[in-house]
């Protein structure tokens, strides 16, 4: 599945956010939320998540692999949606991404990203400037 599109939503007082209808089926009943190295959150369907962690789990004898496992697994949680298509985001994930009220849910190929709207607008402007200055044309 390839996710694409930008959707604007709000966190409710219980830290819930709607997942766009066209993303819901592809995510499945259980999926994963991950604290990215940027100031956002990633959502992965279960199949893609297993692909990402597969190699690490097979190399537990290697000290570097065990370190990577610890770093990876402390940044992830399993999620499911309620009947209205919302997810509840834990406070540690909210804090990591700096989410306030208005958020952007953005499809990026094999993952979904969730950004605070202000942070997203800043990043989007920087990306546009970088593309123009580097001559990237699609």
Image (cartoon, rainbow, N blue to C red):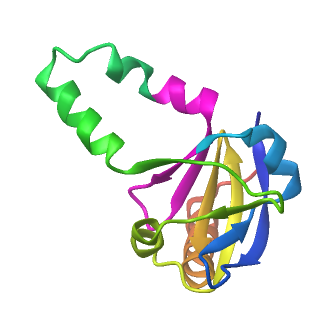
Q: Residue at x 48, y 66 (%)?
A: 90
Q: In this view, which residue lies farthest toward the front?
A: 83
Report the side of 49 relative to 6 (left or right). Answer: left
Q: Position of residue 5 (x, y in %)?
A: 80, 58
What count of labels does the image hold? Answer: 0
Q: Position of residue 92 (x, y in %)?
A: 39, 68
State yes or no: residue 38 in magenta: yes
Q: Residue at x 67, y 61 (%)?
A: 87
State yes or no: residue 118 in magenta: no
Query: Which quadrant holds residue 136?
Result: bottom right
Report the side of 30 relative to 97 (left or right). Answer: right
Bounds of the magenta segment: 32-52
Q: Position of residue 124 (x, y in %)?
A: 62, 72
Q: Residue at x 77, y 33 (%)?
A: 1
Asked whether 97 or 31 is in front, the reply is 31
Report the side of 88 relative to 8 (left or right). Answer: left
Query: Which quadrant holds residue 103?
Result: bottom right
Q: Is residue 11 above or below residue 58?
A: below
Q: Is residue 70 above or below residue 74?
A: above
Q: Position of residue 50 (x, y in %)?
A: 52, 26
Q: Is residue 120 above or below residue 4?
A: below
Report the side of 118 relative to 62 (left or right). Answer: right
Q: Residue at x 80, y 59 (%)?
A: 85
Q: In this view, which residue lies farthest toward the right?
A: 22
């Amino acid at each position: 599945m390839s996710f694409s599109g930008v959707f604007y939503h709000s966190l409710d007082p219980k830290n819930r956010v709607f997942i766009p209808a066209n993303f819901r089926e592809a995510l499945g009943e259980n999926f994963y939320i991950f604290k990215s190295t940027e100031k956002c959150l990633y959502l992965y369907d279960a199949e893609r998540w297993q692909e990402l962690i597969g190699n690490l789990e097979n190399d537990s004898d290697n000290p570097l692999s065990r370190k990577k496992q610890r770093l990876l697994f402390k940044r992830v949680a399993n999620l499911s949606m309620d009947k209205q298509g919302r997810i509840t985001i834990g406070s540690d994930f909210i804090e990591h991404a700096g989410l306030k009220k208005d958020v952007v849910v953005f499809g990026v190929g094999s993952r979904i990203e969730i950004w605070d709207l202000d942070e997203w607008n800043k990043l989007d402007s920087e990306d546009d400037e970088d593309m123009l200055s580097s001559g990237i044309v699609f």
